[in-house]
Image: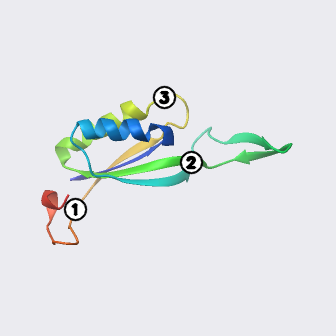
Amino acid sequence: MKKLEAIIRPAKLGAVRDALAREGVLGMTVSDVKGSGPGEARTQCYRGVEYTVDFLPKIKVELVLDDHLAERAAQIVRSNAHTGEPGDGSTLLLPVDAVIRIRTGQRGTKAM
């Protein structure tokens, strides 16, 4: 099993969620996060005072998937979150040793 973590633009969440659902990926965790990357800091002006915005709002999507689906899901996230502009985000694929459902104690793919 693999864990897919993706940091994407908030405006792209709907497209990513819908594309993953079409592939049968329905369970995910979504969090509002803030982040920064190379070249993402912006200068803005509020009431005549300039200030730098270092951390921009992002969405973190987390999924636990079977190995055979993980690469496909990462590709789906990339193609649906891509704008070509700085700040599109990133994905991580991490190994998962075990998944255990709290309610039943089921392990592995049955627990997902």
Kindly identify which residue carries mark 1: 97
* Residue at the (62%, 38%) spot, across then down: 39
Distance of label 1 from label 2 (alpha carbons)? 31 Å
Residue 101 seen: yes
Amino acid beneath label 3: Thr
Q: Is residue 3 left or right of residue 31?
A: left
Residue farthest toward the right in the current orientation of the protein: 48
- Camera-near label (1 vs 2) is 2
Amino acid beneath label 1: Asp
Q: Secondary structure at mark 1?
A: loop
Q: Is residue 59 left or right of residue 24?
A: right
Q: Earlier in the sequence, mark 3 or mark 2?
A: 2
Disc number for residue 57: 2
Amino acid beneath label 2: Pro
Disc 1 to disc 2: CB gap under 8 Å: no
- Camera-near label (1 vs 3) is 3
Q: Is residue 103 left or right of residue 74?
A: left
Q: Return the x and y of residue 52 as percentages of the image width and height.
A: 73, 46
Quarter of the figure that contains the C terminus: bottom left
Tally of numbered discs:
3
**Vertical placement of residue 9 versus 112, above or below:** above
Q: Nearer the viewer, residue 40 or 110?
A: 110
Q: Nearer the viewer, residue 103 or 42?
A: 103
Q: Earlier in the sequence, mark 1 or mark 3?
A: 3
Q: Return the x and y of residue 28 as percentages of the image width and height.
A: 32, 52
Residue 9 seen: no
Q: Earlier in the sequence, mark 1 or mark 2?
A: 2
Kindly identify which residue carries mark 3: 83
